[in-house]
Image (spheres, helix red, strand yellow):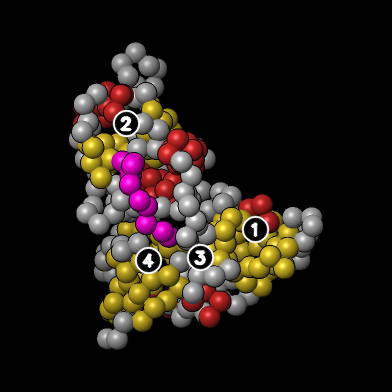
């Protein structure tokens, strides 16, 4: 079939590993683009804008509207969750609730003095969102100096603390380990690989490990078999874990003696990944 571009119009569109098994693989968020590669039994195999493939229900396909075609005027939701309302007041009817990383179209002229912005969703509906819940895309923007960027990546990961573990998840409704790493970087304007491994062609590269407590700085990634965590520096890290008694985004340590020490993960640590220092690809 002829490949065709599409856009996610729902707050979350589920991507499955296989159409016949329906095992969760990933999630697309509102405003994210993809390319349709194949159609089978009412499902579409798609490739996301971050080069990840999965299957979605064919009925959720939508062509990319003109407003979203060139990326101009697109703003990213920065709050964990943000409502789209029919009116610029809190009593307005809720049209939708979007998650951090979602994209909406808006303009500076649409902003009010009392913190509202008129937005257009990819399905053509128009509504209002709080202006401070939106941030401009970073395409072409100079990245902050390393120390600031490291802190921002770690802070984005920490903003998901307490979120339940959800296989294939990427939002405040539920998130998995690689989803947490991916979203922490995406919200800083950097695309990394979606799964828990270092992949050629993406900005994360393996660095000499040595003592992880000394090697992994804030914002770096710690890789384990089938698992990844965001380093907080000094041997501490934040991750989304299905560990018994937790099952959520939490902070743990590689340092013996710490009350939140994870001996099992320390023994299984296989690599440390970093983007520093190098140029970062734009969203």
Instruction: Say which of marks 3 and 2 sits in front.
Output: 2
Give the x, y percent position of residue 93: 73, 64
Instruction: Say which of marks 1 and 2 sits in front.
Output: 2
The answer to whether residue 28 is above or below residue 202 is: below
Q: In which quarter of the image is residue 230?
A: top left
Q: In this view, does 119 lie to the left or right of 233?
A: right
Q: How far apart are marks 3 and 4 (CA)?
A: 13 Å
Work out whether mark 1 precedes mark 2 in sequence or the reverse, and give the earlier one.
1
- Give me the disc on residue 158: none
Q: What kind of secondary structure does the magenta stretch mostly adopt?
A: loop
Q: Distance between the residues labelled 3 and 1?
A: 13 Å
State the quadrant of the N terminus. Answer: bottom left
User: Which residue shows up at 46% across the image and 80% down it?
Assistant: 63
Which residue is identified by label 1? 83
Q: In this view, does 91 lie to the left or right of 66?
A: right
Q: Outermost residue toward the top? A: 257
Give the x, y percent position of residue 196: 28, 46
């Amino acid at each position: 079939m002829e490949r065709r571009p599409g856009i996610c119009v729902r707050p979350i569109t589920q991507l499955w590993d296989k159409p016949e098994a329906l095992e969760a693989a990933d999630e697309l968020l509102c405003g994210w683009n993809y390319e349709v590669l194949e159609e089978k039994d009412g499902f579409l195999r798609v490739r996301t804008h971050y080069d990840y493939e999965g299957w979605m229900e064919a009925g959720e396909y939508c062509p990319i509207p003109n407003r979203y075609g060139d990326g101009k005027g697109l703003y990213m939701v920065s709050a964990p969750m943000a409502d789209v309302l029919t009116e610029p007041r809190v009593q307005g009817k809720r049209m939708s609730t979007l998650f951090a990383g979602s994209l909406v179209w808006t303009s500076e002229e649409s902003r009010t003095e009392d913190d509202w912005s008129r937005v257009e969703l990819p399905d053509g509906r128009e509504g209002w969102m709080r202006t401070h819940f939106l941030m401009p895309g970073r395409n072409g923007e100079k990245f902050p100096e390393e120390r600031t960027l490291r802190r921002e990546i770690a802070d984005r990961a920490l903003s998901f603390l307490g979120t339940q573990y959800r296989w294939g998840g990427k939002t405040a409704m539920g998130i998995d380990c690689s989803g947490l790493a991916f979203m922490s970087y995406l919200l800083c304007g950097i695309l990394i690989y979606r799964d828990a491994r270092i992949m050629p062609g993406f900005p994360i590269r393996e660095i000499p490990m040595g003592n992880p407590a000394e090697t992994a700085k804030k914002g770096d990634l710690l890789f384990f078999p089938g698992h990844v965590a965001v380093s907080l520096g000094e041997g501490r890290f934040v991750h989304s874990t299905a560990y018994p008694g937790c099952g959520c985004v939490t902070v743990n340590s590689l340092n013996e003696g710490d009350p939140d020490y994870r001996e099992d993960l320390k023994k299984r640590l296989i690599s440390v990944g970093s983007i520093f220092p190098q140029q970062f690809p734009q969203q």
